[in-house]
Image (tube, rainbow, N blue to C red):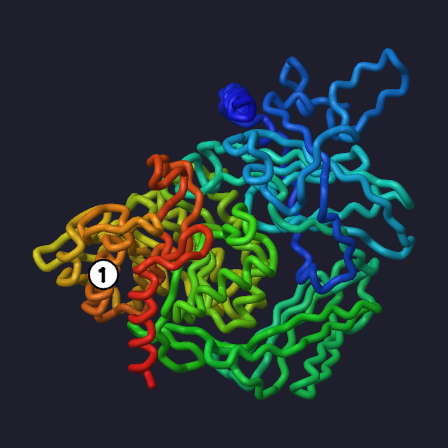
Amino acid sequence: MKSKLFCFLLCSLSLLSHAEGTNKQETDKTVTQSLIQNPSGRESTSLNGLWSYVVDPYENGYYNHRYQPHTDGYFKNDKVKSPSDLIEYNFDTADKINVPGDWNTQKKELYLYEGTVWYHKEFTFQKQSKKRYVVNFGAVNYQAIVYVNGVKVGQHEGGFTSFQFEITDLLKQGDNFITVKADNRRERNQVPTVNTDWWNYGGITREVSILTLPKSHLADYTIQVAKDNTNLITGKLTVDGKNEGKVTVVVPELDIKKKIKLSKNGEASFSFKAKPTLWSPENPKLYAVEFHYNGEVIKDTIGFRTIETDGEDIKLNGKSVYLRGISIHEESPLTNGRAWSEEDARLLLTWAKELGSNFVRLAHYPHNENMLRVADELGLMVWSEIPVYWTVLFDDENVYNKAELQLTEMISRDKNRASIIMWSMANETPNETARLTFITNLIKKTRSLDDTRLITAAMDTQSNSKNGMVIEDPLASVVDIIGINSYCGWYFAEPETCSDLTWESTYNKPVIMSELGAGALQGKHGESNERWTEEYQASVYKHNLAMVENISSLRGLTPWILKDFRSPRRPLKNIQDFWNRKGLLSETGVKKQAWFILHDFYKKIEEAKK
């Protein structure tokens, strides 16, 4: 009872602090910088593990009583030096929490908490005079301000993308500390906005490390096969620091060792002939690739493949492909909170493979890098998305800038992953002029950053005709692949009526049924017309899978969803209990009846292709 009362008080305090409206931290300019490619392939020091934390719903560690930022807030890590000193926090005696990890599922009293939590870690570091140091965060939800040894190094907004800050001048030889102000409050002018259908996990949810780099280092690279010639490997390089000569690109298995000359500004484009085996779900071939520059050797595993559309077809490596998919949220089947580890990724994606999938929709935000690297390895094609979800403020320029930043960070981190075949701009957004302009501009930005992948968005703005459903959203005219979300048998109509439902499209583009499904509590049984039973969910799947066979332009589907996931929108006692129950698996991985129906459907499609 005490823990529940404490949670209620914390949540209430958070709402009071939230009532100011505009978050005043936004007046402090956000610091951004280009991401260093492939941090896991660099020399690094992990900061994962136990961190001290202090819950701060009133943000006393950041603002004074006049609501002005402190110069000596919690980030200073002050210590009592005499008996008369008044310091009202102490990281030395504070409770501990695991990083990576969310605070909601680690601490019962923080289950529903939204607000500021201060994270603090002390560490010993051996600093080298001829090196540069960058702190790398996989993600912090939602706003993060980072301090090293009491000095602010930068801040970042967006809960699902990586960010980095150079800390060379602030690191000391020997003892150091890092402090992070993590704030997961929902605001109307954020991306996503206040209303979603997933859990607002707070904290440092992905890995943290310090990268050790040469003074001049290879900061960024892209390598792939040419879009129109699979016997030509192309790429780009960017060096940060003084130009120290050439970059050597090595692909041992292809007998390639090429020295690439840099321009005066430390950049280069390159191409060379090769005959790589192309990556595909049937043969997810990855090559060891090395980049040698200024004493550093960066190792990566890269797959080479092409993806394009041809009318209503999707072609992988020039051959038509049907995307047998499933949607996935970034929730761990192992820890019951936010997923982040390779073990999480491997289990989730192995389940997808067992289902018969060759494709996954990673909804509704960029997932952790382990998901993409394991997808590369297992041969699962990927739809990767930014959280432009439902009703963000499409007429607000600052909101657009936040969405574009998250888009840029997603592409920057994951552009070398062969598994990603499409970037998604949005999910279930309203059909209005401001939204069309907003998303069209995101598409233009995407094409300027990466013109080798397809662009999509999930739409729920269909209309009705005398024959069935009509796809007539103007957003469909600017994407490469049309995603449609439709819950026949769950949010409208009776399940048995779905089989004969027809769809019309005049766009001559491939269509993916990006969401369909129904909720069921695993283990609850009854008649096929009884909500929340496995039998009802199975009936919805049976009739919807009959429906999709009526869509001539359909080239894949990603039903909603692989596994039950937490959502505050779902309070129904003894059924939902704050879980969205549309999973084909329970939250612990137990299969529901609908799993087997979709599995058999995919098996039939695969066998028909042989």
* Residue 122 x %, y %: 80, 39
Image point 54% across, 70% down: which residue?
A: 376
Identity of the residue furthest to the top in this view:
84
> Left of 487 or right of it: where is 125?
right
* Residue 65 x %, y %: 65, 13
Image point 36% across, 38% down: which residue?
A: 570
Q: Quadrant of residue 51?
A: top right
> Left of 533 or right of it: where is 8?
right
Q: Circle 1 is placed at which residue position?
A: 544
Q: Is residue 411 above or below residue 58?
A: below
Depth check: give the residue in front, 308 or 364: 364
Depth check: give the residue in front, 435 or 365: 365
Instruction: Locate the C terminus and report the quarter of the image it occupies.
Output: bottom left
Q: Is residue 429 above or below residue 285?
A: above
Residue type indicated by callout 1: Asn
What secondary structure is found at the residue carrying circle 1? helix
* Residue 554 x %, y %: 27, 68
> Left of 108 or right of it: where is 457?
left
* Residue 563 x %, y %: 42, 54
In this orientation, does residue 457 appear? no
Image point 29% across, 82% down: which residue?
A: 608
**Mark 1 Cα-neighbour bin, 10 Å: few <14, some 14–19, many ≥20:** many
Q: Is residue 225 above or below residue 592?
A: below
Q: Quadrant of residue 92?
A: top right
Depth check: give the residue in front, 440 or 357: 357
Image point 80% across, 56% down: which residue?
A: 212
In this orientation, does residue 222 appear? yes
How many marks overall? 1
